[in-house]
Image (cartoon, helix red, strand yellow):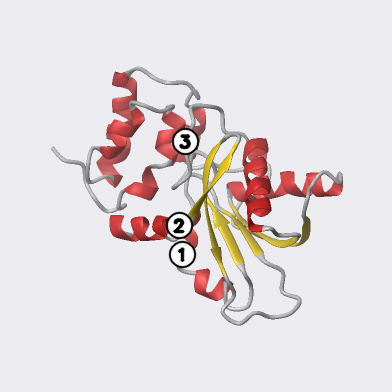
Amino acid sequence: MSEADAAAWSAGGTTVETTDGAVWMRFVAAASPTPGHDPLLVLHGFPSSSFDWRHVLPALSATHDVVLFDFLGFGSSSKPDRRYSIELHANTAEAVVAQAGLERVLLVSHDMGNSVGGELLARDLADELDFTIARRLLTNGSIYIEMARLTAGQEFLLGLDDVPSPHDVADAIAVAICHVHCSTGAVADAIRHQAPVAAVRSWRHYQPPHARPPK
């Protein structure tokens, strides 16, 4: 991944204004539309973004329309200083589906997206959803956080308070992450003005994973 790749991906989408913040989304029409093939609604994982799906997008969109988006706090969506909950992410998914004008979707989810998908299914069963989930495909992830075997990095992120931190704490977080993942000080600058969780979750969209921070 390069910074140019991420920028090109972001440029290929649009922004949906919601009551909770601006949400980035991308609609890709099927290369060979096939009757009876419902649109795919893709829910990304943690701590990542829809950018993870770029390599499989051509296959997904061969016979299905595909809708991808970044949850609030991730990727190209806005990162308000607030708690990011599964309920919030499900609300975001509903707003994206409404913007796309979809009535039925095939839900494709990964990692944290599986949990969000579970919330959407619960709303669907309770007749509280404005669209129908025709089918669901889960990939590589636990639905229930209590049953998940988290990596050390995921435990670290989840253990952070969802409140602004002093500059020295925020800088320490930025340095720890950038030591492996960053090529500039952009993430450090962003962290100073955001809740650490929001900023840390968004680093992958902006920095190449092989780079090192400046001395």
Name the residue beneath numbered marker 1.
Answer: 54
On residue 136, the disc is none
111 up-or-down from 89: above or below = below
Q: Are marks 3 and 2 in contact (CB under 8 Å)?
A: no
What SS does tag 2 mark? helix
Residue type pointed to by label 3:
Lys
Assess whether mark 1 and mark 2 are in contact (beta carbons under 8 angstroms): yes
In the current view of this chain or complex, which residue is farthest to the left?
A: 215
Q: CA separation, marks 3 and 2?
A: 17 Å
Amino acid on which the number 1 mark rests in the picture: Arg
Q: Disc 3 or 2, which lies upstream in sequence? A: 2
Point out residue 55 in the picture as x, y percentages from the top left corner. 45, 68
Disc 2 residue type (three-letter): Phe
Residue at image point 31% right, 48% down: 207
Q: Where does residue 67 sit, x and y in percent of width and height?
A: 59, 61
Can residue 152 be seen in this snapshot?
Answer: yes
Is label 3 or label 2 in front?
Answer: 3
Whether residue 136 is visible here, answered yes or no, is no
Residue at 67 percent across and 41 percent down: it is 91
The tag on residue 51 is 2
| Marker disc for residue 79 | 3
